[in-house]
Image (cartoon, coloured by chain):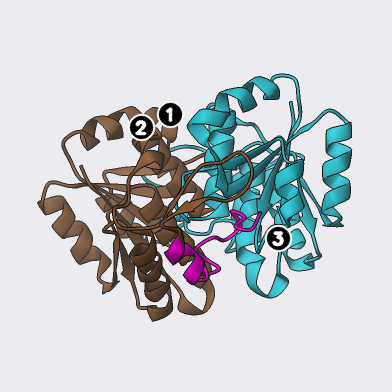
Chain colours: A cyan, B brown
């Protein structure tokens, strides 16, 4: 079944990089789409650029109304997982969510600033990835990794560049394109691109 | 055994929030310490503040020289895992790393901007958390979650506030302190604090 990520409360002046990371993680770990409340053409352009060079069908839709999206998604039979510090623990809730995922699409809601109280009521699960403050990027990553049992890391992204795993060094297939384009900073943020 | 995270190439004007998230994830998912090349008092203050209110013994040390730290760590018998897009896949390398972790401390290296080539040579493992561009915050989170088999999410942080998992709503033990202090934005970034 498919996974959609809803990024709530993005503040362009502050959350640009974090929201970009949320989008990159969504794409890399098997989500089909990120919906963004508010507008940020810079974030959308970064994500579109990565998707066009690295392949696959990931897309971003900005300026959505979260209530409408949640309602529509549920009406279509999907289920909502809201990642929050104040939810049930992963170990407790995950078996039920994985069972649902066999037959239902899942929307993962990831907040930035304060999340409207109504979200907690609409969500099918309020899910805490640990009970300590950390990062929505990390919470999303661990949730998707657990939901898909690690299989998301082997996803194919047709039409894009592909890295060939190596012990040391750097190998990219479709190398002519790789060589001709400078990787954007967010794209490879911190995952070390120059051996 | 213990885990230390080395954050490489932090740029204060650009990486403040991402590095803060790297630090928060390190702490929340069981690392003992984050080492930071370069200096950023703001990041250190944010992380110290979280650690003092939420408990545990996590600490940050800034202005370190990465070569010295890597060398010292290896000389003391520790092993180095460098997270990079251009490494071996998680499924392939993880069994060996987990075996080493039974008797060795692990240093996880997480880069921001371009990582010096020497890091690839010094690292015991160059490890790719998926072959797609995403986020060092996500890569670190998935790595730690896999390394500790999810047990890190149940870590105790003595002396701090504690969230009581609930289906809906928000419960914090040691609530007088929780009520008297405003959570910082990074601390609860996007994991939805206000039901």
**Residue to which mark 3 is pinned:** A46
A174, above or below A42, in the image: above
Residue A6 percent across, percent down from the top left: 74, 48
Q: Are marks 3 and 2 on the same chain?
A: no
A34, above or below A2, in the image: below
Chain where mark 2 sits: B
SS state under label 3? helix
Q: Which residues are magenta?
A: B176-195
The one nearer the camera, B53 or B110, is B53
SS state under label 1? helix
**Residue to which mark 2 is pinned:** B94
Distance (Cα) linking label 3 and label 2: 31 Å
**Residue to which mark 1 is pinned:** B91
Can residue B190 be found in the magenta stretch? yes
* Residue drawn at point x = 89 percent, y = 33 percent: A75
Residue B46 percent across, percent down from the top left: 42, 71
Magenta segment, principal secondary structure? loop
């Amino acid at each position: 079944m498919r996974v959609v990520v809803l990024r709530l409360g993005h503040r362009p002046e502050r959350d640009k990089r974090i929201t970009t990371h949320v989008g990159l993680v969504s794409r890399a770990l098997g989500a089909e789409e990120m919906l963004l409340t508010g507008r940020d053409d810079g974030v959308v352009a970064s994500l579109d650029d990565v998707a066009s060079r690295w392949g696959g069908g990931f897309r971003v839709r900005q300026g959505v109304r979260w209530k409408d999206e949640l309602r529509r998604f549920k009406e279509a039979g999907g289920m909502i997982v809201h990642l929050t510090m104040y939810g049930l623990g992963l170990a407790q809730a995950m078996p039920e969510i994985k069972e649902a995922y066999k037959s239902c699409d899942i929307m993962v809601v990831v907040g930035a600033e304060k999340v409207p109280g109504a979200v907690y009521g609409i969500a099918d699960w309020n899910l805490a990835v640990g009970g300590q403050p950390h990062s929505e990027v990390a919470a999303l990553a661990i949730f998707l990794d657990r939901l898909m049992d690690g299989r998301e890391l082997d996803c194919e992204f047709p039409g894009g560049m592909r890295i060939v795993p190596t012990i040391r060094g750097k190998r990219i297939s479709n190398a002519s394109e790789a060589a001709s384009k400078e990787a954007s900073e967010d794209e490879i943020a911190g995952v070390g691109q120059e051996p």
